[in-house]
Image: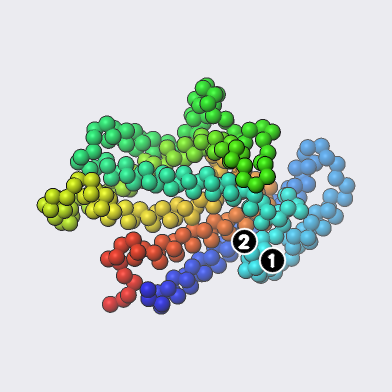
């Protein structure tokens, strides 16, 4: 690989992280309201009596550095990010942002990474089969149903699934990640793991059913351009089996652009699926981000969005560097 190109891509990666981190710092501070005052106001609205609230607000502002000039906060913010120090949560002090993220990210990665990969695999195969002449009519009809469901929002599908499979049939639970009262045992508890999987089925189905149609549309368009290529005609003239032509020649070449979209989609996994996690009380990153925005918890907002930016930028950099391994026709050497 060209070293100059590699350095250029890494430099662009670092520049993207810096610009996104700067916006991540500025946007929450442009919103109206004071996070410390909002927390105390919420406590008073619930009937709590807080003496010397003004002094408490000033003390907390000083503790989190909110009383300092914005440029001082910015420099300290960048210095902390460089050391991966995300600070403390304002709304859940003394919990650290790292603890909040580390406790919620396994649920988000476990749910969205699996559903994203499964949706991608099913979608690209379905999209390729939709325009392949040898595909049975029944399979094409089933794929068309997924295309019809593509415009339906995933949270609407989630509510429909909850109504039928939870409230009507009682097959799956409607919220939570484990059964009430269940706690993990020592070491790896297979029953606890299976309980989490069981509670994740409905959220996963809502995301997958809504997402398959998008991959089908993209793959169908790529397959249409591939079907007229000369190498397919040559493969047919050689008498190769229809399955081999489909998998090794048509599907393999048509799916390459889809990998870029898959990498970007996997990068977004870190942010979680906010509405689905709220509907199912799933304690993932999306749920934590919603709570942080609701309470103007700057450190948690900045921490989650920083991880989101870092994951997306890393995914794009990774797919850009390994693309020649997927398609030998691509080279980074300038001629």
Quadrant location, the N terminus: bottom left
Q: Residue at x 63, y 53 (%)?
A: 102
- Whether residue 39 sits left or right of residue 229 in the image: it is right
Instruction: Judge left or right: residue 330 versus residue 204.
Output: left
Q: Residue at x 11, y 52 (%)?
A: 237
Do the residues under discs 1 and 2 have CB atoms within 8 angstroms? yes
The percent coordinates of residue 269 (x first, y second) are 51, 50
Categorize mark 1 by other alpha carbons within 10 Å: few (<14), some (14-19), many (20+): some
Label at residue 25: 2
Which image quarter holds the C terminus?
Answer: bottom left
- Seen from the viewer's position, the closer of residues 41 and 99 is 99
SS class of the residue under badge 1?
Answer: helix
Q: Can residue 278 be spotted in the picture?
A: no
- Alpha carbon separation for disc pair 1 and 2: 9 Å
* Looking at the image, residue 63 lies above or below residue 192: below
Q: Quick one: label 2, few (<14), some, or many (20+) residues within 10 Å? A: many
Q: How many marks?
A: 2
Q: Position of residue 235 (x, y in %)?
A: 16, 53
Give the labeled residue for mark 1: 73
Please indicate whether residue 311 sits to the left or right of residue 37 in the image: left
- Mark 2, secondary structure of its residue: helix
- Which residue is rendered at x = 54% and y = 24% of the image? 170
**Image coordinates for residue 20, horizontal then vertical, percent:** 54, 62
């Amino acid at each position: 690989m060209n070293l100059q190109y590699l350095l250029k891509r890494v430099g662009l990666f670092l520049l993207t992280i810096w610009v996104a981190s700067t916006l991540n710092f500025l946007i929450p501070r442009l919103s109206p309201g004071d996070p410390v005052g909002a927390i105390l106001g919420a406590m008073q609205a619930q009937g709590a009596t807080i003496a010397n609230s003004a002094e408490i607000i000033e003390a907390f502002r000083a503790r989190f550095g909110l009383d300092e000039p914005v440029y001082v906060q910015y420099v300290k913010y960048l210095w902390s990010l460089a050391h991966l120090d995300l600070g403390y949560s304002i709304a859940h002090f003394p919990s650290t942002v790292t603890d909040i993220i580390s406790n919620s990210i396994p649920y988000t990665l476990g749910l969205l990474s699996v559903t994203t990969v499964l949706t991608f695999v099913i979608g690209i195969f379905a999209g390729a089969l939709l325009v392949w002449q040898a595909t049975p009519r029944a399979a094409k009809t089933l794929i068309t149903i997924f295309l019809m469901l593509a415009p339906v929002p995933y949270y609407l599908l989630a509510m429909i699934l909850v109504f039928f499979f939870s409230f009507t049939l009682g097959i799956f639970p409607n919220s939570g990640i484990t059964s009430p009262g269940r706690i993990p045992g020592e070491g790896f508890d297979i029953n606890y793991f299976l309980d989490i999987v069981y509670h994740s089925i409905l959220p996963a189905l809502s995301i997958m059913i809504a997402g398959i149609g998008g991959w089908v549309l993209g793959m169908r368009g790529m397959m249409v351009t591939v079907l007229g290529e000369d190498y397919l005609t040559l493969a047919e003239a050689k008498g190769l089996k229809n399955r081999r032509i489909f998998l090794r020649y048509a599907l393999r070449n048509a799916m390459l652009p889809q990998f870029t979209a898959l990498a970007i989609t996997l990068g977004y996994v870190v942010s979680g699926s906010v509405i689905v996690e709220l509907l199912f009380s799933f304690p993932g990153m999306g749920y934590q981000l919603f709570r942080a925005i609701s309470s103007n918890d700057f450190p948690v907002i900045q921490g989650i969005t920083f991880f989101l930016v870092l994951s997306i930028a890393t995914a794009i950099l990774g797919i850009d560097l390994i693309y020649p391994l997927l398609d030998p026709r691509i080279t980074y050497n300038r001629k």
